[in-house]
Amino acid sequence: MSTNKTSDILRFPPKLIFGSELITNLTNVFNNVDFFQAFLNTLFVTVVQVICVLFFCSLAGFTFAKFQFPGKKWLFGLLLVTMMIPSQLSFIPSYIIISKLGWVGTYKALIVPGLANAFGIFWVRQFSQEAINDSLLDAGRLDGCSHFRLYWNVALPILRPALAFLGIFSFIGVWNDYLWPLIVLNDPARYTLQLTLSQLNGIYTTDYGMVMGGTLLATLPLIIMFLFVSRQFISGIAAGAVKD
Protein backbone atom coordinates (compact mmCIF):
# COMPACT_ATOMS: atom_id res chain seq x y z
CA MET A 1 0.00 0.00 0.00
CA SER A 2 2.87 2.37 0.70
CA THR A 3 4.08 1.97 -2.90
CA ASN A 4 0.74 2.92 -4.49
CA LYS A 5 -1.38 6.02 -4.93
CA THR A 6 -4.59 6.48 -2.98
CA SER A 7 -6.66 5.77 -6.09
CA ASP A 8 -4.91 2.41 -6.52
CA ILE A 9 -5.43 1.55 -2.85
CA LEU A 10 -9.17 2.28 -2.97
CA ARG A 11 -10.01 0.79 -6.33
CA PHE A 12 -11.95 -2.45 -6.77
CA PRO A 13 -10.73 -5.05 -7.37
CA PRO A 14 -7.75 -4.06 -5.20
CA LYS A 15 -4.28 -3.78 -6.66
CA LEU A 16 -2.17 -6.56 -5.18
CA ILE A 17 1.21 -5.73 -6.72
CA PHE A 18 3.87 -3.17 -5.87
CA GLY A 19 3.52 0.30 -7.34
CA SER A 20 6.02 3.01 -8.19
CA GLU A 21 4.98 5.71 -5.70
CA LEU A 22 7.08 4.73 -2.67
CA ILE A 23 9.58 7.59 -2.98
CA THR A 24 6.77 10.09 -3.59
CA ASN A 25 4.81 8.87 -0.57
CA LEU A 26 7.85 8.97 1.72
CA THR A 27 8.76 12.45 0.46
CA ASN A 28 5.23 13.62 1.27
CA VAL A 29 5.59 12.21 4.79
CA PHE A 30 8.79 14.17 5.39
CA ASN A 31 7.26 17.33 3.92
CA ASN A 32 4.10 17.19 6.04
CA VAL A 33 5.43 16.19 9.48
CA ASP A 34 8.70 16.31 11.40
CA PHE A 35 9.22 12.56 11.18
CA PHE A 36 12.83 12.41 12.36
CA GLN A 37 12.14 14.47 15.50
CA ALA A 38 9.20 12.23 16.34
CA PHE A 39 11.38 9.17 15.70
CA LEU A 40 14.05 10.41 18.12
CA ASN A 41 11.40 11.28 20.73
CA THR A 42 9.90 7.80 20.50
CA LEU A 43 13.29 6.09 20.55
CA PHE A 44 14.35 7.98 23.68
CA VAL A 45 11.14 7.28 25.58
CA THR A 46 11.08 3.63 24.51
CA VAL A 47 14.71 2.83 25.34
CA VAL A 48 14.60 4.50 28.76
CA GLN A 49 11.31 2.85 29.69
CA VAL A 50 12.38 -0.61 28.49
CA ILE A 51 15.64 -0.44 30.47
CA CYS A 52 13.71 0.55 33.61
CA VAL A 53 11.12 -2.19 33.06
CA LEU A 54 13.84 -4.82 32.68
CA PHE A 55 15.60 -3.69 35.85
CA PHE A 56 12.63 -3.21 38.18
CA CYS A 57 10.58 -6.17 36.92
CA SER A 58 13.53 -8.56 37.06
CA LEU A 59 14.46 -7.38 40.55
CA ALA A 60 10.89 -7.69 41.85
CA GLY A 61 10.22 -10.96 40.03
CA PHE A 62 13.42 -12.53 41.38
CA THR A 63 12.57 -11.37 44.89
CA PHE A 64 9.05 -12.83 44.73
CA ALA A 65 10.44 -16.13 43.44
CA LYS A 66 13.40 -16.72 45.73
CA PHE A 67 13.03 -14.73 48.96
CA GLN A 68 10.65 -14.95 51.88
CA PHE A 69 9.25 -11.81 53.48
CA PRO A 70 6.08 -10.85 55.40
CA GLY A 71 2.99 -10.44 53.21
CA LYS A 72 4.62 -12.02 50.17
CA LYS A 73 1.57 -14.04 49.11
CA TRP A 74 -0.81 -11.13 49.67
CA LEU A 75 1.36 -8.73 47.68
CA PHE A 76 1.70 -11.17 44.80
CA GLY A 77 -2.04 -11.81 44.83
CA LEU A 78 -2.64 -8.05 44.68
CA LEU A 79 -0.23 -7.88 41.77
CA LEU A 80 -2.22 -10.52 39.89
CA VAL A 81 -5.45 -8.62 40.56
CA THR A 82 -4.02 -5.49 38.93
CA MET A 83 -3.38 -7.50 35.76
CA MET A 84 -7.14 -8.00 35.42
CA ILE A 85 -7.93 -4.27 35.47
CA PRO A 86 -7.97 -2.56 32.03
CA SER A 87 -5.20 0.02 31.83
CA GLN A 88 -7.63 2.61 30.47
CA LEU A 89 -9.33 2.78 33.89
CA SER A 90 -6.17 4.24 35.40
CA PHE A 91 -5.83 7.09 32.90
CA ILE A 92 -7.88 9.64 34.84
CA PRO A 93 -6.23 9.14 38.26
CA SER A 94 -2.83 8.88 36.58
CA TYR A 95 -3.40 12.15 34.74
CA ILE A 96 -4.49 13.87 37.97
CA ILE A 97 -1.28 12.74 39.68
CA ILE A 98 0.86 13.76 36.70
CA SER A 99 -0.87 17.14 36.60
CA LYS A 100 -0.29 17.81 40.32
CA LEU A 101 3.38 16.94 39.86
CA GLY A 102 3.62 19.41 36.98
CA TRP A 103 4.72 16.78 34.51
CA VAL A 104 2.07 17.27 31.84
CA GLY A 105 3.75 17.81 28.49
CA THR A 106 7.08 16.31 29.59
CA TYR A 107 8.79 13.00 28.93
CA LYS A 108 8.50 12.12 32.63
CA ALA A 109 4.75 11.78 32.14
CA LEU A 110 5.42 9.07 29.55
CA ILE A 111 8.28 7.24 31.28
CA VAL A 112 7.58 7.21 35.02
CA PRO A 113 4.11 5.52 35.00
CA GLY A 114 5.57 2.64 32.99
CA LEU A 115 8.75 2.00 34.99
CA ALA A 116 7.41 -1.42 36.02
CA ASN A 117 4.35 -3.48 35.21
CA ALA A 118 2.52 -6.44 36.71
CA PHE A 119 2.99 -8.69 33.69
CA GLY A 120 6.77 -8.19 33.69
CA ILE A 121 7.06 -9.02 37.39
CA PHE A 122 4.82 -12.07 37.00
CA TRP A 123 6.75 -13.27 33.95
CA VAL A 124 10.18 -13.01 35.61
CA ARG A 125 8.87 -14.57 38.81
CA GLN A 126 7.58 -17.63 36.97
CA PHE A 127 10.80 -17.99 34.99
CA SER A 128 12.98 -17.55 38.09
CA GLN A 129 11.21 -20.28 40.03
CA GLU A 130 12.17 -22.90 37.46
CA ALA A 131 15.45 -21.56 36.08
CA ILE A 132 17.35 -20.44 39.20
CA ASN A 133 18.48 -23.27 41.42
CA ASP A 134 18.37 -22.57 45.14
CA SER A 135 21.79 -24.20 45.56
CA LEU A 136 23.34 -21.40 43.49
CA LEU A 137 21.88 -18.82 45.83
CA ASP A 138 23.05 -20.76 48.88
CA ALA A 139 26.56 -20.91 47.43
CA GLY A 140 26.46 -17.17 46.83
CA ARG A 141 25.38 -16.51 50.41
CA LEU A 142 28.28 -18.64 51.70
CA ASP A 143 30.59 -16.43 49.65
CA GLY A 144 29.14 -13.37 51.36
CA CYS A 145 26.88 -12.07 48.57
CA SER A 146 24.22 -9.55 49.52
CA HIS A 147 20.67 -9.82 48.18
CA PHE A 148 21.41 -7.37 45.39
CA ARG A 149 24.65 -9.09 44.44
CA LEU A 150 22.82 -12.43 44.22
CA TYR A 151 20.43 -10.75 41.83
CA TRP A 152 23.14 -9.04 39.79
CA ASN A 153 25.78 -11.79 39.58
CA VAL A 154 23.74 -14.98 39.88
CA ALA A 155 20.20 -14.31 38.68
CA LEU A 156 20.66 -11.90 35.77
CA PRO A 157 22.84 -14.19 33.60
CA ILE A 158 20.24 -16.95 33.98
CA LEU A 159 17.32 -14.62 33.28
CA ARG A 160 18.60 -13.48 29.86
CA PRO A 161 16.00 -15.42 27.78
CA ALA A 162 13.14 -14.12 29.92
CA LEU A 163 14.48 -10.56 29.79
CA ALA A 164 14.94 -10.76 26.02
CA PHE A 165 11.29 -11.66 25.61
CA LEU A 166 10.17 -9.02 28.11
CA GLY A 167 12.37 -6.39 26.45
CA ILE A 168 10.93 -7.01 22.99
CA PHE A 169 7.39 -7.20 24.34
CA SER A 170 7.81 -3.91 26.23
CA PHE A 171 9.57 -2.21 23.32
CA ILE A 172 6.70 -2.98 20.96
CA GLY A 173 4.11 -1.82 23.48
CA VAL A 174 5.81 1.51 24.23
CA TRP A 175 6.71 2.15 20.59
CA ASN A 176 3.11 1.68 19.45
CA ASP A 177 1.46 3.50 22.36
CA TYR A 178 -0.93 6.19 21.19
CA LEU A 179 -3.59 6.96 23.79
CA TRP A 180 -1.45 7.90 26.81
CA PRO A 181 0.90 10.20 24.84
CA LEU A 182 -2.19 11.80 23.30
CA ILE A 183 -3.47 12.59 26.80
CA VAL A 184 -0.30 13.95 28.45
CA LEU A 185 1.64 15.60 25.60
CA ASN A 186 0.70 19.10 24.45
CA ASP A 187 3.89 20.20 22.67
CA PRO A 188 4.19 19.05 19.03
CA ALA A 189 7.98 19.10 19.38
CA ARG A 190 7.69 16.26 21.92
CA TYR A 191 5.18 14.17 20.00
CA THR A 192 5.89 10.48 19.55
CA LEU A 193 5.65 8.73 16.19
CA GLN A 194 2.08 7.58 16.64
CA LEU A 195 0.86 11.10 17.40
CA THR A 196 2.86 12.55 14.53
CA LEU A 197 1.58 9.99 12.03
CA SER A 198 -2.00 10.71 13.08
CA GLN A 199 -1.50 14.25 11.73
CA LEU A 200 -1.21 12.79 8.23
CA ASN A 201 -4.95 12.11 8.22
CA GLY A 202 -6.76 14.97 6.51
CA ILE A 203 -10.01 16.51 7.69
CA TYR A 204 -11.91 15.87 4.46
CA THR A 205 -9.57 13.72 2.38
CA THR A 206 -6.67 11.47 3.27
CA ASP A 207 -3.69 10.49 1.16
CA TYR A 208 -3.60 6.84 2.14
CA GLY A 209 -0.41 6.22 0.19
CA MET A 210 1.34 8.83 2.33
CA VAL A 211 -0.20 7.43 5.53
CA MET A 212 0.94 3.92 4.64
CA GLY A 213 4.42 5.27 3.83
CA GLY A 214 4.64 6.78 7.32
CA THR A 215 3.36 3.55 8.84
CA LEU A 216 6.03 1.61 6.95
CA LEU A 217 8.77 3.86 8.34
CA ALA A 218 7.40 3.49 11.87
CA THR A 219 7.21 -0.29 11.57
CA LEU A 220 10.66 -0.93 10.10
CA PRO A 221 12.56 -0.50 13.41
CA LEU A 222 10.33 -3.13 15.04
CA ILE A 223 10.91 -5.58 12.19
CA ILE A 224 14.68 -5.02 12.21
CA MET A 225 14.87 -5.43 15.98
CA PHE A 226 12.85 -8.65 15.87
CA LEU A 227 15.09 -10.10 13.15
CA PHE A 228 18.15 -9.53 15.34
CA VAL A 229 16.70 -10.92 18.57
CA SER A 230 14.10 -13.40 17.28
CA ARG A 231 16.06 -16.37 18.62
CA GLN A 232 16.01 -15.00 22.17
CA PHE A 233 12.35 -14.03 21.74
CA ILE A 234 11.32 -17.53 20.69
CA SER A 235 13.48 -19.22 23.33
CA GLY A 236 11.90 -16.98 25.95
CA ILE A 237 8.41 -18.02 24.87
CA ALA A 238 9.43 -21.68 24.86
CA ALA A 239 11.00 -21.40 28.30
CA GLY A 240 7.77 -19.98 29.67
CA ALA A 241 5.62 -22.64 28.00
CA VAL A 242 7.65 -25.80 28.61
CA LYS A 243 8.34 -27.21 32.06
CA ASP A 244 10.76 -30.07 32.65
Image (spheres, grey):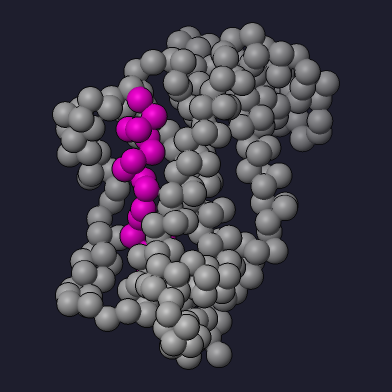
For image coordinates 37% across by 72% down, the residue present is 147
Q: Which residues are magenta?
A: 106-125
* Snapshot quadrant of residue 9: top right
Q: How many marks?
A: 0
Coordinates of residue 20 in the picture (x, y in percent): 83, 21
Residue 171 location in percent, x, y?
53, 47
Our reading of the magenta stretch's main secondary structure is helix
Indicate the quadrant where residue 129 lies.
bottom left
Left or right, 108 with respect to 28, comes to: left
Q: Position of residue 39 (x, y in %)?
A: 58, 27
* Above or below, 45 relative to 199: below
The structure residue drawn at horizontal position 17% and vertical position 32%, both measured from the top left corner, is: 96
| Residue in the foreground of this view, choosing between 187 and 212 | 187
Magenta stretch contains residue 126: no
- Measuring from the top left, give residue 99's x and y in whole percent: 20, 27
The residue under the point 58% across, 70% down is 157
Tell me if I can see residue 179 in this picture.
no
From what the image shows, is residue 52 above or below residue 204? below
Residue sitting nearer the eye, 156 or 65 = 156
